[in-house]
Amino acid sequence: MLLTGTPRGSFGFEFSPELQDDDATLAVHQVALENIADAIELAADTESPEDLSDSIPTTVIQPLTRLFQTLSRYDAELRLAFPTSRSRTIAAATIKAASERLTRTIEQNDVQFAGTFRGLTRETGCFDFVRDDEVLITGFASDELTEDDMERIDSLTNHPCRVSLQETQVQKAGKTQTSYLLVNAIKAPE
């Protein structure tokens, strides 16, 4: 989301799911928005961001870091409000400190490797890939992959291919913890 030409002062957004005949969809949206608010609050309050990787999926950490960087750049504060619970306010100084901690501790890069795709579990999204240098990489498939993408990638099992991954490195207790998100896989040229 990019906001341009906004006035100085306060403004806000209200996220309201479209009303559906299905109350279950409305409940899922409500839980998702509350989870997002909890992740934002956790990131703001956590003194050691390496602990975030235990509580927040790695796929969320990079966009969360960008959100904090943007808010920090404009010296903004954030207020989260839900009709069923108390509102939460995160001060500009807290946002700035969290942005600096996240940027310093968590690094994400897009990487590519050649090797053999060893499989994808469709229900859990777990994958295994063995690089050409025999290093095993395991991780999860991106939520952005469609069912057709999953079918295509699954057909590469035990075949040479090239994978595109998002690599997340978190500094934790003096060590680097690395996790991978599968973005794409293509058959290696013959």
Image: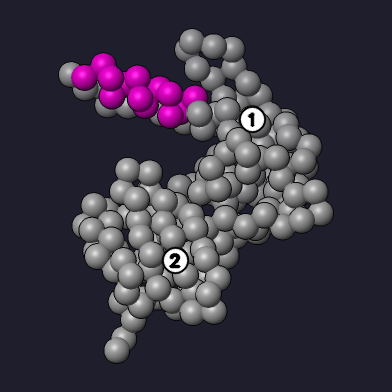
The amino acid beneath tag 2 is Phe
Position of 81 with respect to 162 (left or right) is right
**The C terminus: image quadrant:** bottom left
Camera-side residue: 106 or 78?
A: 106
> Which residue is most to the bottom?
190
> Which residue is most to the right?
174
Segment tinted magenta in the rendering: 22-34
Taking the image as drawn, is residue 9 in sight?
A: no
Above or below residue 163? Residue 174 is above
C-alpha span from label 1 to label 2: 35 Å
Label 2: how many Cα within 10 Å (few below 14, some 14–19, many 20+): many
The amino acid beneath tag 1 is Glu
Is 88 colored magenta in this rendering?
Answer: no
User: Percent from the top left, x then y, of residue 124?
Assistant: 38, 44
Above or below residue 117? Residue 92 is above
Foreground: disc 1 or disc 2: 2
**Which residue does the image show at 55% across and 48% down from the upper left?**
58
Above or below residue 129? Residue 190 is below
Magenta portion: prevailing SS class: helix
Q: Classify mark 1: helix, strand or loop.
A: helix
Q: What residue is pinned by disc 2? A: 129
Position of 177 with respect to 126 (left or right) is right
User: Percent from the top left, x then y, of residue 53?
Assistant: 63, 43
Camera-side residue: 54 or 72?
A: 54
Q: Mark 1 or 2 closer to N-term?
A: 1
Camera-side residue: 44 or 170?
A: 170
Q: Which mark is residue 137?
A: none
**Which residue does the image show at 43% across and 29% down from the upper left?**
32
Q: Which mark is residue 41?
A: 1
